[in-house]
Image (cartoon, rainbow, N blue to C red):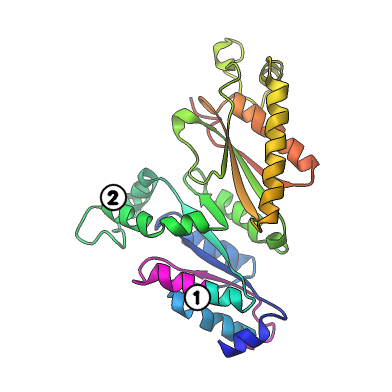
Amino acid sequence: MSTTRSKLNDAPLELAVITGLSGAGRSTAAKCLEDLGWYVVDNLPPSLISNVVDLAVRSHGGIDRIAVVVDVRSRAFSSDLRETLDTLARAGQPARVLFLDAPDEILVRRFDGVRRPHPLQGEGRLVEGIEKERELLRDWRSQADLVVDTSELNVHELRAQIASAFEAGAADELHLSMVSFGYKHGLPVDADVVIDCRLLPNPHWIAELRPLTGEDEPVRDYVFAQPGAAEFLDLASALLRRYEQGYVGEGKHYATIAVGCTGGRHRSVAVSAELARRLREDGVEVQLTHRDVERE
């Protein structure tokens, strides 16, 4: 580490660590970063990350953006990765950790689709391997800079989300992902903040509004005209602005705001779009997704 220590403080590289659940999209994330011009190393033991960084430093600018994909096949995965990243941080080389996640049932479906075993299931069941991996990665999920739930994302949407977070200059900005959802379909697994819209009357019970969504003007007008709706929006906006300030102050550059109602078609869609509009007016980059708007 002597070379790394002596040179990183002047011009640190961009370093990203890609990890997460097997089947959640690590390879797709790696390919996306490679297409963005990152030098990607797949399946690298955590203890070797420092060596790759040192070699990049010796390239004198030939390599300035490195992404490494690590997983739990390394026996000392967690301790080795923590020690390596702490050592690099002390040398002036911070790393961003991207964590890919998805619910167990989605992972089971993906493994069944490709007809291959989970790397940790051994002689046991697939779900047992997923459970072991999730437990081993629990701390890393909570500490990651960016958690992406890939269960509702196609390949193109995943690539767009990663590109937004890791394009040039992204590390110095706050990036918010806002997702509307329906509680009956489950909470988004990557939510940092959850806002509940179920205190507002439900347009579902208005016959002419039921087939519409929160993207339609009649639904928006109905939702925002309800008693307390304006106050709710003002309070939610103020809360999100406070989160924005706190996240920036703590060096957190990525966050997911989940806005929920019962089915995810009406109230949460209208409210999330309005909150996103207000944040954008404040200069915050917001990516808006309506997860359950097409569901019944």
Q: Is residue 27 above or below residue 208?
A: below
Residue 192 occupies quadrant: top right
Question: Horizontal placement of 205 versus 165: left or right?
Answer: left
Do the CB atoms of the residues marked 2 and 1 lie less than 8 Å apart? Answer: no
What span is colored magenta in the figure? Answer: 58-85
The residues bearing labels 2 and 1 have C-alpha atoms spaced at a distance of 30 Å
Q: Nearer the viewer, residue 13 or 157?
A: 13
Q: Which mark is residue 84?
A: 1
Question: For residue 288, which quarter of the picture?
Answer: top right
Q: Nearer the viewer, residue 271 or 204?
A: 271
> In the rendering, at what x and y percent does residue 253 appear?
65, 55
Report whether 141 appears left or right of 158. Answer: left
Q: Is residue 240 magenta?
A: no
Q: Nearer the viewer, residue 202 or 31?
A: 202
Q: Is residue 210 visible?
A: no
| Residue 195 locus on image (x, y percent) | 59, 33
Residue drawn at the location 52% of the way across and 83% of the way down: 51
Q: Quadrant of residue 53?
A: bottom right
- Looking at the rendered structure, the secondary structure element under dot 1 is helix
How crowded pointer 2 is (Cα within 10 Å; few <14, some 14-19, many 20+) is rated as some
| Circle on res. 211 | none
Q: Where residue 37 sits in the image (x, y, percent)? A: 64, 70
Q: Amino acid at mark 2?
A: Val
The amino acid type of the residue labelled 1 equals Thr
Q: Earlier in the sequence, mark 2 or mark 1?
A: 1
Q: Which residue is mark 2?
A: 127
Image height of 65 relative to 117, above or below: below
